Image (cartoon, rainbow, N blue to C red):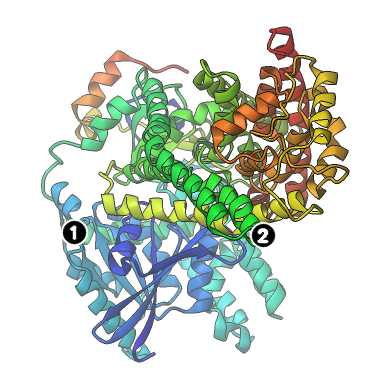
């Protein structure tokens, strides 16, 4: 599973950043390091790019780039909810996610 | 250095660096460029307790790799200029990421002071920061600063003075410890580098070794060029990469980033407590509207519309005032000064030339005022976020949208703004299509022509020219991306900073910086251009100017226009308004040139004055209007229009001319900027392709105009 597949309002944990060279280093330097938790704040009006919250700041990635970040969903739903608050849960139920 | 201290300001974008710099230096600052590139370099001085502190504002960066020119500039300044102290401005409300840069400043082995900005915001967000503990971990004084009030700045200066006086041995050395294997490799490479005593005396060897492990292309080249240890050191770095890849399935640079963040995370864990969950996240609330799925685009377009309304409708009033002043000055000089070359030069060359541009100064300043608000508030990043998918379709970055918008003001700073783009290809394409975005210097031409020939629909006509420019930018951009520049894209990683209320002071400073760049361009390039044009259009000629028109001239105009569009009203020869100032049997240089290239423009319906005006417009497009003024021997805009109608211009030709002015070669200053940002080849290409494009599109426009009955 990659960051590309995570829905609006969900939280995931980074396992690994693929790619190489400056591309990969840039992603990592902006905080996308293994172990870090990422919250998907919103998709742009045209569904790309995506706004994430990582290391307590907001950053946007294109979905094609987000596909280089391998993630897992935390097993306990509670983690995500505590982080995202109610807004995230409401979004999730609406299910705006498309592939 | 006892009483002179050089201080560099480093920090993440949006960390409040500029605010602090402005607060400290006030008006004692100057803006320039970093050698050879157009990244802003701001310098200023502060006097504090008998010390003269020179401040240099480094470009805002997230890191110090060779990822962008800003990063290279920042680190090279620290390495090569060796400032006495580096102030690292850290956004206290976001230590997790901001301190990442700090770990790299530590690596540079420089005297460091941490300025914690936004302490009030951090406090509101429920963060309790143990600055004493953090200070110990990073071995640097930490000075908390509050918002935009300037509270804490004296403490900051005191810390700078104290730190500057620390002697080497008294400084405790700290560093981020890396994974064992990396540390071993670092040590080996370091010892190899230190074999070259001369090299390692000027280049901190641990830092250089780290960069070699990170495969930093700049440093690889530096090492290759300047030390005999290069081969050995580079081989070791390559071996280290193989080792870590087999052991950790990761390259050294990944492991290094990971450890730096690990260090930061550890430090933050030990010294920051999150007291409460933030009550309301204002940024998130605002974004839920401004970046809304359905509302995002309408709001963006409305904002841009508003920007233009404010620029041009509000700007109209001061503009009128300046125009009246310029007219008055011209008339005054003509009557007050004894007739002669000098009074001609002043009244007919310099005053109308510069005055014709000065009237647009209010528009420029208002536009930059609004752009500053967009930038400082954080909305610009949202615009890029919303527009990225569209820009990406052109093969560009959402951030390309920002230089494109700025292009509406002036292409020169817009091209400078492409520095924020990380990919060279993106930058070149954005630069090449930027002049298609109609800058404000072209507006006087549109206002004159649209106002004269389409008095009822001037607004719509001008709007259509702008739209045409945008549409062509898209078409051409896509064409370039598909044909000339095909390459992979860098990751689109863009921070969406928290919304901040821009301060009036900051916005005014920003506006002044950008606006005065335009003023500078005006007073140097344009003044020179106006004088050259005045010279070319006066000589060789009889010394009496301000003369009646002559039959020769009128005939010339009529021949062209009759031949071309046949509807030209006969020009008056009563002498109230002249069509130019060609003397019998003697043409000025400019007219000679104009006449000789005039056949090129016949298919577009332009009278010969147009070719002359376009020639002079090469210097700067606003000169087109003043050239018409000089050629038709009138100063005020309305009379230029009347003279043009008499001179045989048709609405179709006028529209085609506007299209031509929109598209043809960028002005001299823009070409200079393009050359600076790219290469002479790209700059000449820009000139060439735009001339061809301008001719083709104008031709089409003119023919359509004739079909529509405007000929």
Please report the residue visible at 39 percent of the width from the left and 31 percent of the height from the top.
Answer: B313
Q: Which residue is mark 2?
A: B340
- Tell me if A63 is positioned left or right of B191 in this view: left
Residue B254 image offset from top left, x and y in percent: 50, 54
Please report the residue visible at 29 percent of the width from the left and 25 percent of the height from the top.
Answer: B289
Residue A79 image offset from top left, x and y in percent: 23, 34
Residue B525's label in the rendered image is: none
**Which SS class for mark 1?**
loop
- Tell me if B344 is positioned left or right of B23 in this view: right
Q: Residue B110 sits in which quadrant? A: bottom left
Foreground residue among B574 and B160: B574
Q: Residue B92 sits in which quadrant? A: bottom left
Q: CA distance from mark 1 to mark 2?
A: 57 Å
Foreground residue among B152 and B524: B524
Residue B86 image offset from top left, x and y in percent: 38, 73
Please report the residue visible at 26 percent of the width from the left and 76 percent of the height from the top.
Answer: B157
First of labels 1, 2 by sequence position? 1
Residue A36 image offset from top left, x and y in percent: 35, 44
Foreground residue among B690 and B241: B690
How crowded is the residue under tag 2: few (<14 C-alpha within 10 Å), some, or many (20+)?
few
Q: Label 1 is found on which chain of the structure?
A: B
């Amino acid at each position: 599973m990659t960051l590309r597949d995570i829905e609006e309002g969900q939280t995931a944990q980074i396992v690994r950043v693929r790619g190489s060279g400056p591309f990969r280093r840039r992603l990592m330097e902006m905080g996308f390091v293994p172990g870090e938790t990422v919250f998907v704040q919103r998709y742009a009006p045209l569904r790309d790019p995506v706004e994430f919250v990582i290391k307590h700041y907001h950053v946007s990635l294109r979905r094609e780039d987000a596909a280089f970040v391998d993630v897992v969903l935390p097993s306990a739903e509670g983690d995500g909810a505590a982080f995202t608050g109610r807004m995230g849960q409401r979004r999730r139920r609406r299910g705006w996610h498309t592939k | 250095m006892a009483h002179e201290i050089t201080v560099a300001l480093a920090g993440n974008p949006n960390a409040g660096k500029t605010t602090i710099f402005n607060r400290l230096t006030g008006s004692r600052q100057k803006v320039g460029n970093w050698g050879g590139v157009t990244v802003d370099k701001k310098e200023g001085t502060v006097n504090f307790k008998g010390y003269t502190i020179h401040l240099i504002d480094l470009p805002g960066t997230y890191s110090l790799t060779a990822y962008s020119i800003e990063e290279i500039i920042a680190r090279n300044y620290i390495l090569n200029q060796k400032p006495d102290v580096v102030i690292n401005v850290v956004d206290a409300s976001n230590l997790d990421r901001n301190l990442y840069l700090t770990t790299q400043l530590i690596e540079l082995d420089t005297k460091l002071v941490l300025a914690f900005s936004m302490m009030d915001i951090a406090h509101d967000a429920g963060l309790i920061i143990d600055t004493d503990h953090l200070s110990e971990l990073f071995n640097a004084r930490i000075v908390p600063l509050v918002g935009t009030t300037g509270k804490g700045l004296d403490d900051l200066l005191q810390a700078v003075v104290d730190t500057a006086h620390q002697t080497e041995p008294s400084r405790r050395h700290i560093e981020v410890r890396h994974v064992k294997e990396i540390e071993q490799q670092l040590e080996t490479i370091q010892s190899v580098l230190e074999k070259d005593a001369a090299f390692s005396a000027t280049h901190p060897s641990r830092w250089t070794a780290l960069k070699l492990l990170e495969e930093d292309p700049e440093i690889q080249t530096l090492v290759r060029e300047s030390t005999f240890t290069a081969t050995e050191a580079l081989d070791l770095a390559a071996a280290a990469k193989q080792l870590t890849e087999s052991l950790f399935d990761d390259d050294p640079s990944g492991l290094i980033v990971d450890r730096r963040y690990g260090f930061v995370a550890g430090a933050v864990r030990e010294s920051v407590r999150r007291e409460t969950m933030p009550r309301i996240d204002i940024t998130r609330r605002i974004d839920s509207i401004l970046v809304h799925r359905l509302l995002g685009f309408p709001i963006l377009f409305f904002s841009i519309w508003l920007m233009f309304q404010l620029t041009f409708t509000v700007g109209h009033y001061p503009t009128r005032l300046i125009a009246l002043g310029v007219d008055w000055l011209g008339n005054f000089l003509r009557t007050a000064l004894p007739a002669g070359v000098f009074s001609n030069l002043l009244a007919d060359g310099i005053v109308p030339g510069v005055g014709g541009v000065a009237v647009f100064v209010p528009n420029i300043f208002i536009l930059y005022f609004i752009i500053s608000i967009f930038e400082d508030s954080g909305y610009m990043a949202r615009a890029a976020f919303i527009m990225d998918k569209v820009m990406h379709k052109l093969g560009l970055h959402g951030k390309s949208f920002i230089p494109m918008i700025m292009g509406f003001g002036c292409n020169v700073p817009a091209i400078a703004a492409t520095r924020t783009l990380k990919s060279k290809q993106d930058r070149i394409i954005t630069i090449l299509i930027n002049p298609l975005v109609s800058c404000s210097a072209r507006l006087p031409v549109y206002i004159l022509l649209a106002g004269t020939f389409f008095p009822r629909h001037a607004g719509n006509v001008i709007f259509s020219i702008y739209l045409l420019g945008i549409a062509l930018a898209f078409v051409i951009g896509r064409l370039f991306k598909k044909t000339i520049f095909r390459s992979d894209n860098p990751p689109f990683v863009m921070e969406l900073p928290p919304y901040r209320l821009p301060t009036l002071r900051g916005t005014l400073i920003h506006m002044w910086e950008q606006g005065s760049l335009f003023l500078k361009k005006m007073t140097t390039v344009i003044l020179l251009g106006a004088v050259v044009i005045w010279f070319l259009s006066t000589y060789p000629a009889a010394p009496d100017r301000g003369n009646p028109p002559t039959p020769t001239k009128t005939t010339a105009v009529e021949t062209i226009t009759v031949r071309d569009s046949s509807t030209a009203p006969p020009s008056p020869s009563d002498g109230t308004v002249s069509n130019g100032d060609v003397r019998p049997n003697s043409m000025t240089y400019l007219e000679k040139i104009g006449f000789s290239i005039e056949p090129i423009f016949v298919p577009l319906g332009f009278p010969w004055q147009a070719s002359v005006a376009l020639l002079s417009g090469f210097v700067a497009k606003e000169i087109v209007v003043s050239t018409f003024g000089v050629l038709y021997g009138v100063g005020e805009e309305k009379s230029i229009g009347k003279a043009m109608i008499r001179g045989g211009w048709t609405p179709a030709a006028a529209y085609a001319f506007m299209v031509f002015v929109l598209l043809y070669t960028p002005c001299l200053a823009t070409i200079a900027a393009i050359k600076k940002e790219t290469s002479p080849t790209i700059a000449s290409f820009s000139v060439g392709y735009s001339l061809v494009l301008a001719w083709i599109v104008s031709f089409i426009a003119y023919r359509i105009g004739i079909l529509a009955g405007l000929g």
